[in-house]
Amino acid sequence: MEIRFLGQSCVELTEGETRVLVDPFLTGNPKAAVAADEVEPTHILLTHGHADHYGDTVEIAKRTGAPVLAIVEIANELSEVGVETVHDPNFGGTVQFDWGWVKLVPAWHTSTTPNGTVCLPAGLLIHIGGKLVYHLGDTALFSDLQLIAQRGNHVDVALVPIGGHYTMDRFDAVTACEYIGADVVIPVHYDTFPPIETDAEAFKSDVENATETKVVILAPGESHTVR
């Protein structure tokens, strides 16, 4: 299974013919590795409604026919604007696919879509290719990260925001990594804009000194293979 970082919090998970696109903020993203019309996902997942995550969801879904999974309020909005296939879980809900499953878990943040729908933000547990990927979404540090990570499958890869200002900073993110205990952490949501600029190499050093977790820093467009 391959994880390709596309900028901000957008990643593409590929396993065989399955291409899962998470938080497709590409248009207007100064760090985007690809344009919105260059991705061909089979599925789209959203953590929450802010524009730097919701992004090009509607356009990509309509063009490709990819089903979109998002918390129920966002899913309802997507249906109303013409996205044909949506999955609408709430916290604790799991949606099964032929390639694996996705479970919605809490994140501490806020969330309103560009169209004004107020909803709760989420993290995503994504089971694909026999591996568990935990996309934390935009979250502050909170103690239930331990519960989420320890309830069920071991987390193989965690996608952790480190930019601060709108999410946890790189220091709180070290504690989050301690809570989660993933084999690999990939930092996201940093350096896209001045308020979230940070030192990813220092984060890597701090995490690897404090835990057994390996930190993989990906530039937009780069990939990490999970074996």
Image: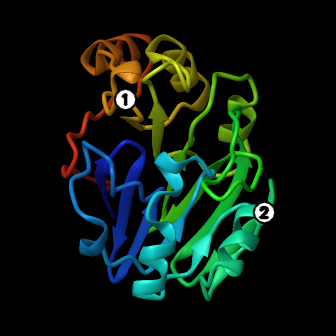
Q: Mark 2 or mark 1, which is nearer to you?
A: 2
User: At numbered mark 2, what does the secondary structure look like: helix, strand or loop?
Assistant: helix
Type of amino acid under label 1 = Tyr
Say whether residue 171 is left or right of residue 41: right
| Mark nearer the N terminus (2 vs 1) | 2
Query: Height in image: 165 above or below 51?
Result: above
Residue 35 at x, y = what percent?
24, 64
Q: Residue at x 32, y 54 (%)?
A: 226
- Labelled disc at residue 73: 2
According to the picture, the residue beneath numbered tag 1 turns out to be 190
Binning the other alpha carbons within 10 Å of mark 1 as few (below 14), some (14 to 19) or many (20 upward) gives many
Answer left or right for 187 relative to 88: left
The one of 125 and 168 positioned closer to us in this rendering? 168
Q: What residue is shown at x 65% (from left), y 73% (from top)? A: 78
Q: Position of residue 20 (x, y in %)?
A: 43, 69
Residue 51 relative to residue 18: left or right: right
- Within the image, what quadrant is residue 96 found in? bottom right
Between 65 and 105, the residue placed more toward the observer is 65
Q: Residue at x 45, y 18 (%)?
A: 211
> Residue at image x 26%, y 50%?
32
